């Protein structure tokens, strides 16, 4: 069996045109601070990291990470790459535990786990390519004819613009949508009214026969959310996402006892972190991101745990590493989907760095049975818009 020969990491810095976000674009955790600078700065990321794991026969598996790319690259180069070079990629469980346990003092959450995620994703892509099978086949196979997706953009802005975007998505065949809130606790009752106007306006377009999800991105607090929930109930949201900061598990648990399901987990890490959320009944929907949570190896364990609790898993941010898990798990009913768009927040960079991501048609996307691995290649179409750090 071929062994791992090398690991190559690169940071992709976007230097091309960007769309500046408008005011009240989306609430976020830093809204609680007195800040003279760019309040949206923590919400945007215009860098990405790729991790290429090469086998002795020249086959290359591709992983990636979007959080703290320079720090993640340094962690892989200095700590994780030496642990896997010379090893059999099909010993993926051993390699994951080796990376996790040997850096446990500092690596079990945040940047360390993000780095493990990128390496693990690359290993799964490599395994798929070595056996000429798509990753979802290695995870148990096809459990859906095709994957339903929800349209996830609808950033808070002018009401007319949000309605026009929602109508375009309806016309494209989508049956589920997620919108963002632009106002939070510091904006008082006037901000509440602005939030409610936009929920009502989007509901006018999508109707009540389609799902509507609402996201706070950790920009609210417990008191504010308690006050908002009764006002939102009549709009029948499928869930309210990340209303409080990720570490406030007790806040999530209290809110999740209310009339609107609470979702979260985008900023949680590893199997044991999700066991805490599930034991506390803190979320009704789990939203890990595979390139943060510990990679595909960790994500599969979380999927099995969540299924035992009958809590659905709907991974954050779309992208191929998440789609393969959704295809192969009965407890992953739908996927998040960002349309290709000019670079704004940074989620869009995935389309500019990689080729192979499927495009949604009539609210569904498909994964090929014939394409091995994750089905991604690194694109050269937009190289002029990146400054790449080796």
Image (cartoon, grey):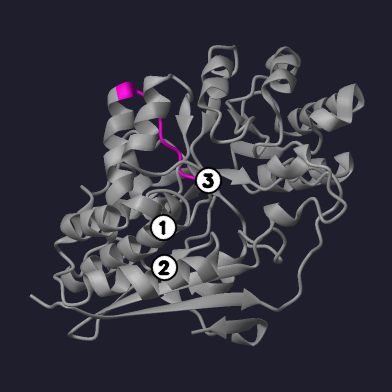
Could you tell me residue 318's position as x and y percent? 50, 52
Q: Is residue 46 above or below residue 326?
A: below
Contact flag, marks 2 and 3 (Cβ < 8 Å): no
Q: In the rendering, which numbered label is found on residue 190?
A: none
Contact flag, marks 2 and 1 (Cβ < 8 Å): yes
The stretch in magenta equals 309-316
Q: Is residue 3 above or below residue 169?
A: below
Q: Main secondary structure of the magenta part?
A: loop
Residue assigned mark 3: 336
At label 3, counting other C-alpha atoms closer than 10 Å, the crowd grade (few under 14, some 14-19, many 20 or more) is: many
Residue assigned mark 2: 75
Residue assigned mark 1: 112
Going from the N terminus, do you reach mark 2 or mark 3 first? Answer: 2
Q: Is residue 150 above or below residue 255?
A: below
Specify the farthest residue to the right.
190
| Residue found at x 38% / y 75% | 77
Q: CA distance from mark 2 to mark 3?
A: 29 Å
Using the rendered view, name the quadrant where residue 231 is placed.
top right
Secondary structure of the residue carrying tag 1 is: helix
In this rendering, the label closer to the viewer, 2 or 3: 2
Relative to 265, is 294 on the left or the right? left
| Residue found at x 43% / y 19% | 281
Q: Is residue 232 magenta?
A: no
Secondary structure of the residue carrying tag 3 is: strand
Could you tell me residue 339's position as x and y percent? 62, 56
Q: CA distance from mark 2 to mark 1?
A: 7 Å
At label 1, counting other C-alpha atoms closer than 10 Å, the crowd grade (few under 14, some 14-19, many 20 or more) is: many
At label 2, counting other C-alpha atoms closer than 10 Å, the crowd grade (few under 14, some 14-19, many 20 or more) is: some
Relative to 319, is 218 on the left or the right? right
Question: Can residue 102 be spotted in the picture?
Answer: yes
Specify the farthest residue to the front.
105
Comparing 326 with 251, the one in front is 251
């Amino acid at each position: 069996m071929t062994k791992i020969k090398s690991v190559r990491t690169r940071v992709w810095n976007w230097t091309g045109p960007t769309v500046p976000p408008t005011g009240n674009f989306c609430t976020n955790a830093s809204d609680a601070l007195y800040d003279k600078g760019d309040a949206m700065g923590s919400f945007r990321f215009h860098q990405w990291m790729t991790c290429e794991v090469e086998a002795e026969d020249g086959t290359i598996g591709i992983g990636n990470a979007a959080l703290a790319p320079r720090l993640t690259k340094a962690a892989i180069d200095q700590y994780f790459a030496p642990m896997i070079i010379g090893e059999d990629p099909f010993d993926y469980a051993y390699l994951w535990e080796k990376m996790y346990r040997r850096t446990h003092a500092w690596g079990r959450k945040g940047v360390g786990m993000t780095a493990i995620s990128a390496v693990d994703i690359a290993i799964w892509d490599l395994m798929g390519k070595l056996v000429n099978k798509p990753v979802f086949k290695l995870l148990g196979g096809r459990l859906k004819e095709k994957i339903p997706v929800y349209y996830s953009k609808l950033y808070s802005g002018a009401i007319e613009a949000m309605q026009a975007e929602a109508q375009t998505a309806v016309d494209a065949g989508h049956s589920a949508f997620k919108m963002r809130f632009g106002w939070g606790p510091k904006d008082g009752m006037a901000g509440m009214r602005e939030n409610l106007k936009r929920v009502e306006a989007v509901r006018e377009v999508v109707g009540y026969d389609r799902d509507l999800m609402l996201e706070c991105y950790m920009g609210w607090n417990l008191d504010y959310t308690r006050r908002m929930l009764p006002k939102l109930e009549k709009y029948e949201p499928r869930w309210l996402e990340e209303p409080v900061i990720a570490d406030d598990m007790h806040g999530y648990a209290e809110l999740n006892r209310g009339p609107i399901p609470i979702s979260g987990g985008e900023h949680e890490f590893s199997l044991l972190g999700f066991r805490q959320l599930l034991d506390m009944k803190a979320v009704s929907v789990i939203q890990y991101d595979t390139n943060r949570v510990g990679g595909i190896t960790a994500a599969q364990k979380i999927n099995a745990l969540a299924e035992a609790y009958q809590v659905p898993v709907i991974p954050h941010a779309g992208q191929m590493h998440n789609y393969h898990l959704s295809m192969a798990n009965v407890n992953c009913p739908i996927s998040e989907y960002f349309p290709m768009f000019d670079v704004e927040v940074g989620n869009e960079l995935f389309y500019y760095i990689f080729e192979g991501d499927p495009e949604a048609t009539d609210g569904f996307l498909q994964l090929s049975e014939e394409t091995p691995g994750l089905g991604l290649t690194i694109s050269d179409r937009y190289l002029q818009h990146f400054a790449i750090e080796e």
